[in-house]
Image (tube, coloured by chain):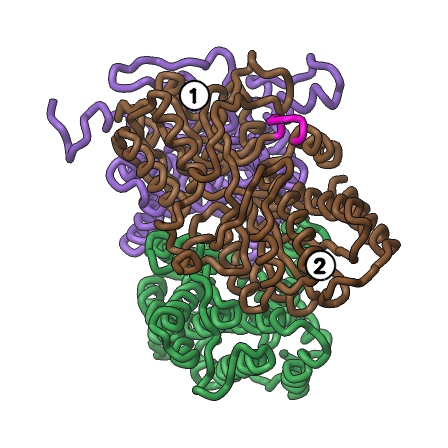
Amino acid sequence: MSARPIPWGFVILIGFGLVAPVLGIYPTFLMKCWCFALFACAFNLLLGYTGLLSFGHAAFLSAAAYTTGHAIKVWGLAPELGLLAGTVCAGVLGFVFGSLAIRRSGIYFAMITLALAQMLYFVWGQMSFTGGEDGLQGVPRGVLFGMLDLSDNTNLYYLVFAIFLAGFLLIYRVIHSPFGQVLQAIRENEPRAISLGYDVDRYKLLVFVLSAALSGLAGATKTVVFQLASLTDAHWHMSGEVVLMTLLGGLGTVFGPVVGAFVIIGLQNGLADKVGSWVQVIMGIIFVVCVLAFRRGIIGELGRFLRRPL
Amino acid sequence: MKKKLMITAIAGVLLGLAAGVPAQQAKLSGGLVKIGILTDLSGTYSDLSGQGSVIAARMAIEDFLKQEKNPFKVELVSADHQNKGDVASNKAREWFERDGVDMIGDLVTSSTALAVMPVAKEMNRVTIVNGAASTNITGKACTDLNVHYAYDTYALAIGTGRAVVKQGGDSWFFLTADYAFGHSLEKDTSDVVTAMGGKVLGSVRHPFPGTDFSSFLLKAQASGAKVIGLANAGTDTTNSIKQAAEFGITPKQSLAGLLMFITDVHSLSLKTAGGMYLTEGFYWDLNNETRAWSKRFFDQHKRMPTMVQAGVYSSTMHYLKAVKDAGTDEAKAVVKKMKDTPVNDFFAKNGSIREDGRLLHDFYLLQVKRPAESKGPWDYYHVRQVIPAADAAIPAAKSECPLLKK
Amino acid sequence: MFELLGISPQALYSQLLIGLINGSFYAVLSLGLAIIFGLLNIINFSHGAQYMMGAFLAWIGLTQLPQWLGNPDFAVNYWAALVLVPLIVGVFGVFIERTMLRRLYKLDHLYGLLLTFGIALIIEGVFRDWYGVSGQQYEIPEVFQGVINLGFMYLPKYRAWVVAAALAACFATWFVIERTKLGSYLRAGTENPRLTQAFGVNVPLMIMLTYGYGVALAAFAGVLAAPIFTVSPKMGADLIIVVFAVVVIGGMGSILGSIVTGIGLGLIEGLTKVFYPEASAVVIFVIMAIVLLVRPAGLFGKEQ
């Protein structure tokens, strides 16, 4: 696992990110993809590299989305501060959820995160600033650092891509750091990691907070792009969707979640107009096929074919 | 089957249009008028809007081109917003920026309507909301490029609340879905009830969506109120009605549905829903004109139109005529034309669009027929009262919309 | 008459009774989930969809089948549906087990969860496409129409039947598993499949039938639910999460735990509806979080 992924993986990713809008791919769609790619990567850090299945990651996405939306719209903060506020809020929430959840493992860990996320969903529904099920709308895009006008799609696109890339590189760096090695040791054999003298709980909590904060960054960015935050972000379906993206792309691979996010969002976008309500059935079939036939996911299988970890 | 029908139908429209003579007098962006129906094609609201709205819009376009002898090209696109605000705003942006859509219609459920309106405003395009109910659409969130056509919660609350109190139902208990829409429906109705001299004995807020309403219904029963107001929608409403019958609450206490559509009644059957009061902005069996149009709609959709679907037809027609008369598809000019011209068709008589975008038209207080009174499928309502347009919209003085405060 | 926190005892009794009725639904559903988890180590996310299938098939049998066959005599009435529908859905479950689940036994829990999640999406999507979302109505059978006057409330006869039928199904299942020879094989299979196999018990067959039975229980609950709730493709989707929580609180895989917790949570939910109705959807998750933190294996589960 420690072997470096082939550098041209990065070349393709960055190259694609830079030229995609020029190729005529619709920029708002791309921005959505990058937001979810970051979300999935953050989730993968937890599931793929630490072996912790959180079924409540929608909580962090939504917490940041609402905070950022509120900060920019009502408090009139600049977008960079709004994004920061959202990320910090998600991180703090991650600390609270994480401290409770990491006391348990396996399926119980998943259930606690689910329970906490459901409670948060309830809270969002009750609070007035979220706009209930109508959502928080009309968040202005604003001007970044007082100079870059984000209402211009091209500017916004490159900002979103830069945010994604920063998050992605951070995750990449974490995975390949000594800290990341300990995480993988925990995934492979927790008792052994404990016996080697690692304070496993602290590692778990730290990675949980990191994952939550990065998920939050994704949610905050999404709010700036779509100018709205809604309860959809907090529903447990969202938590399920991020699992699907990660699994489809390849659990515990660096590039997998990115590919997974693009495929799922692409399918949702592309299919919705053509097959209408069959979208759900198709997603279900993908799930089933994925679990039965290629559990390594797209990138995982590709990596096996190339005999390189990707 | 339905899908195939639609695809062939749309293809038909496009072919028909391509053959038309594009005598270009009007100044049109992209050389044609493009209309997008953004609706729920797969979820909770797909029966009351969905495919039916797409069909209604297509009928409007065909009729317009026939009546006006192909003055310009019109194209129709449709998409499923899955009732998600972000999906809706994403699609709207894509349509405006990439596909040159001039007007987005239907927009069922308030969260999607409220998400699309600011996008349209920013891009200088028109939105015509038919499916959504929130009064915010012409209130706090109003824009000068939006028209709210078919109905809103205020009209329904006024209609049902006032009429039921007049008929002697002067003590109320509310069963309210615990979200913004339910709250506003409850508030609007209780205001009307108390203003009319009735009493509100209490209310209970149930989680949304819910399945079992029995304990809430028991509270309503214990309150002794004559009328139980259902401030909820969709399966929540149908479940409440079904369970009220089961617990023997009806017919001792009567139910008032504050947001119900003919499709809900169709799904409940008259045996369960018979006797209920509700308000709609349209019923297919009002007069010869509504019957004629609805029959045409029925032939294509195999269901009678809801007020949303009828509204989509009427508003699309009104929009296209405004484009023709204004000689441009530029949003501000078109909306101004729409506001200057009264609406006179099977849907609205002497309807007019106010500055805040609200279409003022008559509503109908309806009572659901008992099984013995109905002559057959879709013969569901007695029209008990016509609620005049002036009463059915929030008075301009009370509106939160800045456009009305001049 | 004394009043407790502003609620008259009559109102309280009736709310508790309603809680009991809902609790018995939770019990039947969580029981199915629990036995599947106990023996297969799979969290059956499609349980809600199978419950929905039960309700839908009952409705199809009553109203659609005679139309398809063009003969009103072919309608499957309520009683027949109560037997036939769980059988059909059970066979469907066996098919899923044979063709798909079987390949996942040696893998992490996660994959079983994801597979059944996918299956749930497919089932729900298909029904949604066929029958729309407005929902269908199923008549309460003739014998159960009307209400019983209990003094403090009017109890619909059908609800009384639901409680009786649900508790009977729970008791029968509990009895078979805890008190019969077949049950002892099952329990042995849960503890140590290899050893049990070595003693000549056909463990794979047993697993298959267990999954079928668990799914059939879900369908049984679905048929029971059809006359009171609107039969719609979405009816199982939100319920599944609650039932999940019930199983977790009771202790994953614990038969008795799931029954007792199901009923208990129904009661608690009923009380919440009295005092703070808005929170009735979330109270179960609050309890789940607390229980898991204090007693991680659930109320009746054994710490592993």
Q: Name the residue under label 1.
A: B245
Q: Colour of chain A?
A: green
> Callout 1: helix, strand or loop?
helix
Region in magenta: B284-289
- Circle nearer the N terminus (1, 2): 2
Q: Nearer the viewer, residue C220 or C282?
A: C282
Which color was chain B given? brown
Q: Which chain carries label 1?
A: B
> Is there any visible trace of residue A305 in the rendered image?
yes
> Is residue B285 part of the magenta span, yes or no?
yes
In this figure, which residue is indicated by the disc labeled 2?
B34
- Marks 1 and 2 close (CB-CB < 8 Å): no
Residue ID at (53%, 73%): A38
Would you identify the image quadrant in which residue A100 lies?
bottom left
Is B130 displayed left or right of C163 in the figure?
right
Chain hosting mark 2:
B
| Relative image position of residue B376 (x, y in whole percent) | 64, 18
The image position of residue C250, as x and y in percent, is: 36, 43
Residue appearing at x 74%, y 47% in the figure: B64
Please name whichever residue, A32 or B61, is drawn nearer the observer in this view of the structure: B61
Which chain corresponds to the colour purple?
Answer: C
